[in-house]
Image (tube, grey):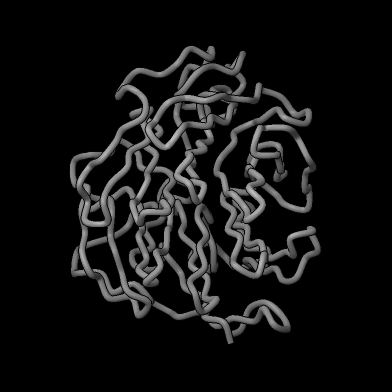
Amino acid sequence: MKYGTGKYTYELVDGWAKLPEGWSFLDVGGISIDSQDRVYILNRSDHPIMVFDREGNLLTSWGEGFFNRAHGSAIGPDGSLWCTDDRNHIVAKFTPEGKPLMTLGTKGQPSDTGYIRTFDFWESLARIERGAPPFNRPTGVALTPSGEIYISDGYGNARVHKFSPEGKLLFSWGEPGGAPGQFRLPHNIWLDRQGRVWIADRENSRIQIFTPQGEFISEWTDVIRPTDIFIDDEETVYVSELCLRVSIFTIDGKLLARWGNEGKDKETALFHAPHAIAVDSRGDIYVGEVSMTGAGIDKGPRTVQKFARV
């Protein structure tokens, strides 16, 4: 079966990830692809980082025992892997082989935003009274070519922070709310080639775009609960949405392709909870889901789905 349209037409590579017997991703927090098209999958299983080649062969795994709840990831300009852990309130840098290099934040010590985690997600989000310093459940991370670090601080905060390559906090912006420059769960982050900062402002159902200094430029509203953003070398924008679909846009916001569930029942649905999206050098798309959290379903290898460009 084909998805998309025109130049942006794809075929599902069914069962792409070749997992060892008894392994599962459970939930996928982030997907990052390096210059060799190795796919780093940050997940919430006993093997938090699994690394695959393009064909879905497992190359290695690491990170056991490090994470409380893995959430977002990015490849740095030096090939390092950066990961957020929203329940440990930290962001960590690793070598590609898994050696820890740097940790931002203090494990187990959230900043004071008024947030109190409860069993009711919406009640918890509503308790955020103010923006605060790093971190209260950070979500996403992105790096400039010179190594500066931008972090979306989302589940328990409503801010974006910028750090120097050495880990010094430079500045922050954002408050809880729905006005420009405010956030309701800044869920992930991307930097385009102009250095603009793109934020998936999930519960405001929009993408906000800022200057490198955090000044509001514009917003896109043709998305529903966006979870992740990827912009390729052609400046095509790929968005995963928690409303059970994937959307592809031009850099100016023109919709190029979109697909989702089309009324399928829970057991046969294409998507259950899209959470991460990444594109390799050949234009193939990888979508990771939090299907255990979102739908109570362990999709096994299909928690990550590959859509190969036709």
Q: Residue 246 sits in which quadrant?
A: bottom right
On the rendered image, what quadrant is the C terminus found in? bottom right
What residue sits 42% from the left and 54% below the top? Answer: 77
Among all residues in the image, which is located at the extreme front?
Answer: 146
In the image, residue 229 above or below residue 125: below
Classify 11 as above or below 244: below
Depth check: give the residue in front, 200 or 161. 161
Q: Which of the 4 image quadrants contains residue 181? A: top right
Q: Residue at x 54, y 23 (%)?
A: 124
For residue 108, side relative to residue 114 (left or right): left
The picture quadrant where one finds residue 18 is: bottom left
Q: Position of residue 193 (x, y in %)?
A: 63, 56
> Could you tell me which residue is drawn at 52 percent across and 27 percent down?
120
Q: Residue at x 67, y 77 (%)?
A: 4
The x, y position of residue 32, in whole percent, is 42, 58
Q: Is residue 273 left or right of residue 175?
A: left
* Residue 82 on image: x %, y %: 37, 46
> 294 or 109: which is nearer to us?
109
